[in-house]
Structure formats: structure tokens, C-alpha cells
Amino acid sequence: MNKISPSLYCLLAVLLLLPAACVGAEPMTPTPTSLPPTQTPLPSKTPLPSETPLPSETPLPSETPFPTITPEGDIGSTWVRLVDGMVMVYVPKGVFTMGSSLGDPDEQPVHDVYMDAFWIDQDEVTNTMYARFAPARSGRHPVNNVSWEQAASYCAWAGSRLPTEAEWEKAARGPEERTYPWGNQFPTGDLVNFADLKSRLSWEDTSVNDGYEKIAPVGSYPAGASLYGALDMAGNVAEWVNDWYDETYYSTAPLTNPPGPAEGDFRVLRGGSWYSTAAGVRSADRGWYIPEGGTDYTGFRCAQSAVAP
Ligand SMILES: [Ca+2]
Ligand SMILES: [Ca+2]
């Protein structure tokens, strides 16, 4: 996210190019859905094997209990959350470096953080998934215009929770201090949906064509995956995480599983969006917004601790 206050951000959008940016209009075309008959419910007690393709168009029984997740697994391990069909990817325990000396003051001091193992959604939560929880469009575009409260409620409903800010950054960057999920290479059209030449924004990068003016279907940039296989951690929709925003938190945060500040006025948004510059989709960049607000460019994904059985 650009470091512009939310109110100025909206004012700029209103005054300049995007009169609809703050009121939620989104002229995307919903993906046609041809829902198959629902006579074949999935077995509710049997965890799906990790290779099972995402049944994104098949309604799943929402009563299915979330399976117990164990810390077993390596990079590349996946799990399907039965409630909504989301594929989750595994992030092993260990130390990673949080923050960046290349970025804004709120990304510093750079510090090493130990994280327990966890799972995080491979994709941004889609409209089709969200529609099982509350009225929404359908299709594989990420749901947007959701508040922090709505995002947190969805994750709880799905048996998960919002990731902490530290979990999100580790899932995006891995232990190698990557600038972007894919590495340190500057964004190209096959890596990320950001403010490229399609965006028609005054800050667009005219040297890159990512194919989308606004939101792209989730998983449109497989080459931009993180070390752990999480997609669209950079760009597309910015993602709510659990933490309150505190620009000085890194100075005092615990170095093991930091839970975030106890209180605040804004919640953190991570990863930037179709509305962001290349700098704004860096994985250490920290955005924020009022928790009761949602915009065209804010969505979310969920996470789940890897709990010993
Ligand atoms: Ca774009
Ligand atoms: Ca994203």
C-alpha cells in the first residue's frame, strides 16, 4: 500500500480517476458458474488427500468439522479446508527475517523472528467461497469490499483465523529476505497484478503489462508464488491480517510468534493490490485501514496453526 492516509487516498481517487474506488463499484465480469448437481456430498470425516484438485465450483457441506492439522509436513505440503474448499499451504517452523531496510520507517528495525509452523490459504478467499458464508458474487475473483470484521468472521466460520502480520510476512518472504514472494526480481507481467499500464492510474508502471486493470482471478500468476506456494501474496487484493497497526511495533515486538499490538485504531493490510506501485507490493510493506471499512482493493486469506494432535 502506498503510504497515503486512507482519507487522502480516497480523496485522491475521487478527485482524479476513480470516482467509484471508495464506494465499492467493481465492473468485473463474474465468472459463469455451472454448478453441478449436489447429490454427491463429500465424506465429512475423511480429510481430502493433498493432491485433490480444488473443487471450487462444488458446494461443500458447511457443517464439516475442520480436520486436525498436525505439524508434520514439508514445504509443498497442502491441505484442503473442507468448509470452503480452500487449499492451504504449509509453512514450517523456524526463523525468518522480518522488516526491510529498503522500505519505510515502519518496516524497521529489521529483526529475526521465530515462528511456529502454520498453514495459510494458497489463494485469496474467492467470491464463490465467501458466498457460502454471506451473500456475495460468485467466481474465482477474490472477494473484496469486506471489512476486517467480516474477514475475521469468515475465517472463524471456516475453522481458521486471520494470519498474524508476522505469519503473513513469513509466508510471503520465506527465510531468504525476499523482496517479493517470487524473489528479488522487479515485477513483470507474469508475476503480479499491480498498477501496470492497464490500470489507468496516474502512478501506473507503463513498462509492465499484467493483463488486468483491476482485480484478476486468484492464481492468475503462478510464477509469482511464494517459497511455500502461496499465490497473489503480492498485489491483486491487499489482505487483512489480524494485527492492529503500530508503526513502531517492530521496536518492541516479541521475537517468537509476535501476536501484534494489544490495541490500535487501524488494522494491517499486506501485499498491496492492483491499485499499488511496485514498491507497494513489496512483501515487507505495511498498509493499514479502518477495520470497519472495505474497499475495491481489500480482501483476505486465512491461516491455521499447525497443532500437535
Ligand atoms: Ca494490473
Ligand atoms: Ca494479495
Image (cartoon, rainbow, N blue to C red):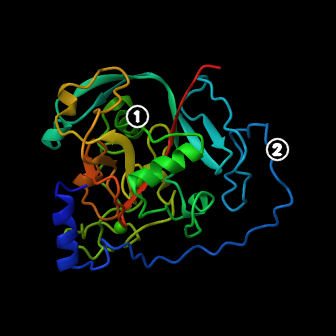
Please state the horizontal and vertical placement of residue 116, each as a whole percent of the image. Answer: 46, 23
Residue 167, label in figure? 1
Tag 1 secondary structure = helix
Picture layout, residue 208 above or below residue 255: below
| Label 2: few (<14), some (14–19) or many (≥20) C-alpha neighbours in 10 Å | few
Q: Which residue: 32% across, 23% down?
A: 113
Q: Which residue: 33% across, 39% down?
A: 243
Please state the horizontal and vertical placement of residue 179, each as a whole percent of the image. Answer: 29, 42
Picture layout, residue 266 above or below residue 24: above
| Position of residue 40 in the picture relative to residue 214 (left or right) | right
Tag 2 secondary structure = loop
Name the kind of residue labelled 1 in the image: Glu
Farthest residue to the left: give it: 105
- The numbered mark, 1 or 2, whose residue comes first in the sequence reads 2
Farthest residue to the right: give it: 39
Please state the horizontal and vertical placement of residue 149, each as a whole percent of the image. Answer: 42, 51
Q: Is residue 82 visible?
A: yes
Residue 229, label in figure? none
| Label 1: few (<14), some (14–19) or many (≥20) C-alpha neighbours in 10 Å | many
Q: Which residue: 25% across, 45% down?
A: 285
Q: Which residue: 38% across, 49% down?
A: 240
Q: In terms of image quarters, where does ligand 1 lie?
A: bottom left
Q: Find out whether the residues at labels 1 and 2 contact each other: C-beta distance under 8 Å.
A: no
Locate the C terminus and report the quarter of the image it occupies: top right
Residue 43, label in figure? 2
Locate the N terminus and report the quarter of the image it occupies: bottom left
| Position of residue 85 in the picture relative to residue 117 (left or right) | right
Please state the horizontal and vertical placement of residue 195, each as a whole percent of the image. Answer: 29, 66
Q: Is residue 122 visible?
A: no
